[in-house]
Amino acid sequence: MKKKLEKMRQMSEAELAAEVKKLKNELFNLRFQQVTGQLENPMKMRDVKKEIARAKTILREKELKKAARG
């Protein structure tokens, strides 16, 4: 967990935005699987939502640091 968090913190803003987009797409696919009854692990949806929140939080931190400097 911590390694993934550190990896996210080292990403650029563009990379984080791309990661959020990828995770949202994955969440959409998981929701589609849930509706069609094909989702084997419902906890995966919770994990993906948390990853999206982490990425957005780090992205916001970077934006605030950038604004404070500029």
Image (cartoon, rainbow, N blue to C red):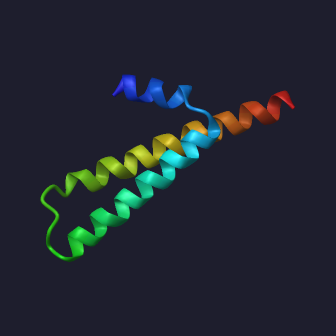
Say whether residue 21 is left or right of residue 63.
left
Residue 2 found in image quarter: top left
Q: Residue furthest bottom?
A: 36
Q: Residue furthest right?
A: 70
- In the rendered view of the protein, which quadrant contains the N terminus? top left
User: Disc count in the image?
Assistant: 0
Say whether residue 69 is left or right of residue 16.
right
Q: Is residue 27 above or below residue 33?
A: above
Residue 10 found in image quarter: top right
Foreground residue, 2 or 29? 29
Residue drawn at 30 percent across, 52 percent down: 46
Q: Is residue 48 above or below residue 59?
A: below
Foreground residue, 53 or 39? 39
Residue drawn at 40 percent across, 44 percent down: 51
Residue 64 at what x, y percent from top left? 72, 36
Residue 67 at what x, y percent from top left? 80, 36
- In the rendered view of the protein, which quadrant contains the C terminus? top right
Residue drawn at 35 percent across, 57 percent down: 26
Residue drawn at 21 percent across, 69 percent down: 34
Q: Is residue 26 above or below residue 62?
A: below
Residue 36 at what x, y percent from top left? 19, 76
